[in-house]
Amino acid sequence: MINGLALRQKVAKNNEEILLAVRQEEIDTLVDALIAAKRIYVAGWGRAGNCIRLLSMDASQLGLKTHIVGDNSTPSIHEGDILVIGTGSGETDTMKILADQAKEHGATLATITHGPDSYIAGKADIVVNIPSAHTREQMETLTLAEILSFYQVEVALNDVIMSLMAEKLGVTIHDVLANHNNLE
């Protein structure tokens, strides 16, 4: 039987170690590229897709133009735009196609991944690698919460990215609240 408190402590420690292992230079490069982009597009499937959508929401609350790939209202991508793909493996077939299409249209391609040697990372101009905290062999001894740590750290990383962008843009919490969704 899993002890809930012990599990939370273990997950928190694990996530802290992973988040602190992400290279700050990679984060800073992505922050600068997001700010410089004409428009921000995000894409991802499954959990990684849900997490990357938060980055789009955060960017919109900072007053930036952002779109989620797959929405009917998403315009065409062009040079000066950036596509950020959230992907654990970096090998999701649909995301590979989107990465290729973004590059074909002259957009900057970024990825937040734990697959730094993956297809998508190989195509990307900017790679933010969330390192894995465990090997495949260790998975048998881990809880699901520990195995899924990439996604938990991806969400925390979005908050870091938003905060860094806000500071560089001079955006305050009042600006964020003014841009917050009011169709609730």
Image (tube, rainbow, N blue to C red):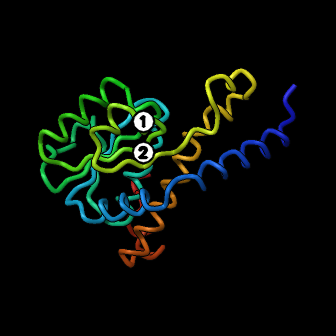
Residue at 87% x, 34% y is 3
The image's mark for residue 112 is 2
Q: Secondary structure at mark 1?
A: strand
In 3D space, how far apart are the residues under numbered discs 1 and 2 (Cα atoms)?
6 Å
The three-letter code of the residue at mark 1 reads Thr
Which is nearer the N-term, disc 1 or disc 2?
Answer: 1
- x then y, percent, for residue 113: 44, 40
Hey, which quadrant is residue 76 in on the image? top left
Decide: is 124 above or below 57: above
- x then y, percent, for residue 118: 38, 32
- x then y, percent, for residue 179: 38, 65
User: Looking at this view, is 59 or 81 the one in front?
Assistant: 81
Decide: is 157 above or below 89: below
The residue where tag 1 is placed is 87
The image quadrant where one finds the N terminus is: top right
Label 1 crowd bin: few (<14), some (14–19), many (20+), radius 10 Å: many
Residue at 40% x, 69% y is 178
Decide: is 181 above or below 178: above
Residue at 19% x, 60% y is 38
- x then y, percent, for residue 54: 44, 49
Left-right relation of 125 to 92: left
